[in-house]
Amino acid sequence: MNFYAENLVKGGLNADYITSILGIVGAVPMAVAILFVAPLCNKFGKQKITIIGMAIGVVGGIIAGIRYDNMAVAAVGIAMKCLGSAPAGYMILAMIADSLDHIEARTGKRCDGFVMSIYSSIMIASTPVAQGITSALVGGSEIGSVIAYIWVETVCYGLGAVVLLFYTVEKYLKSDRETVLARQKAEAEAAGIAWIPPEERLRLEEEGADRLAEEARKAELKARCEKKGLDFETEEAKYQQKLAEKQAKKQKK
């Protein structure tokens, strides 16, 4: 971005100031996107929203790449580019998880560790590679800055959208879950272990956590009453009354 600001956006403005502005212009859309990316993906699907995001990013990149000499137009393009990258950025791990569930449903095996190790390796290795490519492309030239900061990402967004066309595991999510649960139940029964559905297991775990928290609260209250010479039953009754009043207010809302 520094090369882009120094070499491309003219008009007498300080390069550091321009870099800051472009950084904010790119960060704000991604921050706002946190509020609606997940709801949109839940409603329309991760694949569709991510592809649409990539398309927006491509359009923004084209705008910023063609009109890099105009601060306002370039800022709009960069904002669109960053906004378009938000669904992929926020949903990538969820999409990987869906793929892992699909693999388990098809093969009966989990490969989370293997896949995540590859993902982490790519993320780590890509940084120095990208820095090297950027330095080679920039070379102090104006067009090199445009290619490095705008066009490389724009092309990657386009390629990413094409790849996502083959991401079809979402339509199998329900059947995959049923297959995995049926297999887990059969394995538990074969081993003579009582099968507890995930929802029931979660409920039991939450009840257990609530019970432990309540026991800890009472123990703390007893210790406080002994220290201050208060009656435990009276203080407990006060607590329960306040709790009932709070719950009543919530129900009214």
Image (cartoon, grey):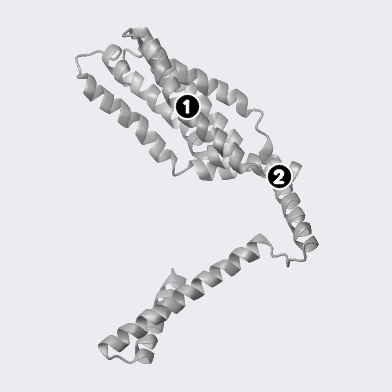
Estimate the x, y position of residue 35 in percent, counting from the top left: 44, 44
Image quadrant occupied by the N terminus: top left
In the foreground, 131 or 180: 131
Residue 16 horizontal/vertical position (percent): 22, 23
- Image check: 105 left or right of 165? right
Q: In this view, does 108 lie above or below 207?
A: above
Tag 2 near tag 1, CB within 8 Å: no
Of the numbered discs in the image, which one, if any, rests on residue 4?
A: none
Q: Name the residue under label 2.
A: 109
Q: Nearest the camera: 220 or 49?
A: 220
Q: What residue type is labelled 2?
A: Lys
Marks 2 and 1, the one that precedes in the sequence: 2
The percent position of residue 32, horizontal first and vertical second, equals 40, 40
Q: For the C terminus, give its image quadrant.
A: bottom left
Q: Circle 1: is it few (<14), some (14-19), or many (20+) Cα within 10 Å? A: few
The residue that label 1 is drawn on is 125
Q: Is residue 243 left or right of residue 69?
A: right
Residue at left 75%, top 50%? 179
Q: Which residue is drawn at 68% across and 38% down?
A: 169
The foreground one among 39 and 131 is 131
Residue in the picture at 47% in, 42% down: 36
- Quadrant for residue 44, please give it: top right
Residue 203 in view (yes/no): yes
Q: Nearer the viewer, residue 228 or 159?
A: 228
Q: Where is residue 87 in the image (x, y as percent from the top left)?
A: 50, 35
- The answer to which image quadrant residue 128 occupies is top left
252 lies left or right of 51: left
